Image (cartoon, rainbow, N blue to C red):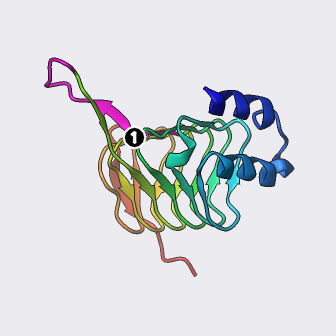
Amino acid sequence: MVWRITWLITCSWTPKFFNPWRLCVLKIFGAGILGNPFVHGTVRIQIPWHIKLHDRACLGDRVCAYSLGIIEVQESATVAQEVYLCTGTHDFESSTMQLITDSITIGKNAFVGVRAMILPGVKIDENAVIGANAVVTKNVSNNEIFAGNPARKIGIRKKLS
């Protein structure tokens, strides 16, 4: 509760150039901040101490990081606006529907397109691209391009020069 109120009052309204302030608040609440990532003020983060952001990583406008498990966004990776990073689900085969959490990793130089949904346990490797509105249910290897619902491989990203 303290986290949500703090973010609402001190960060959610801030302009882009207040990024250092937002990173400071995230650090105070236990987020792993390495280098200089960028976090929009409109980002929603469930549990900040489960977030790890590397240098030049970006969480875009209105990203929802449902961080019941660890979410790591590696160097120069971009998570575009309104992406939903979901680390929690339920065991639907159990009568108690017990909570299940697993991590999400977005690899170096990867790009997750607008309004995509990344499900628990997914690892998106280096230089991979996830198309807009994709629902990613399984791992994506280096340089692969995935799109659709459910997301499927549609191509290979050319090597970065």
Tell me the magenta residue range.
84-96
Q: Residue 124, image x and y in percent?
A: 40, 58
Outermost residue on the bottom side: it is 161
From the viewer's perspective, tell me whether residue 106 is left or right of residue 103. Answer: right
From the viewer's perspective, tell me whether residue 32 is left or right of residue 134. Answer: right
Q: In which quadrant of the rendered image does the C terminus lie?
A: bottom right
150 up-or-down from 34: above or below: above
Query: Which kind of residue does numbered mark 1 sit on?
Result: Thr
Question: Residue at coordinates 72% horizontally, 52% vertically from top-left?
Answer: 23
Q: Please rate how many residues cluster around mark 1, counting C-alpha atoms within 10 Å: few if below 14, some from 14 to 19, many from 20.
A: many
Judging depth in this view, the residue of 21 and 119 nearest the camera is 21
Outermost residue on the top side: it is 95
154 up-or-down from 87: above or below: below
Judging depth in this view, the residue of 151 and 35 nearest the camera is 35
Question: Residue at coordinates 22% horizontally, 22% vertically from top-left?
Answer: 97
Q: Residue 36, image x and y in percent?
A: 71, 64
- Answer whether residue 88 is magenta in the image: yes
What kind of element bears circle 1? loop
Identify the image quadrant of residue 20: bottom right
Question: Residue at coordinates 64% horizontally, 54% vertically from top-left?
Answer: 58
From the viewer's perspective, tell me whether residue 76 is left or right of residue 86. Answer: right
Question: Residue at coordinates 60% horizontally, 26% vertically from top-left?
Answer: 1
Judging depth in this view, the residue of 139 and 7 nearest the camera is 7
Q: How many labels does the image show?
A: 1
- Answer whether residue 92 is magenta in the image: yes
Q: Residue 116, image x and y in percent?
A: 48, 40
27 up-or-down from 116: above or below: below
Judging by the rendered image, the residue that carries numbered circle 1 is 87
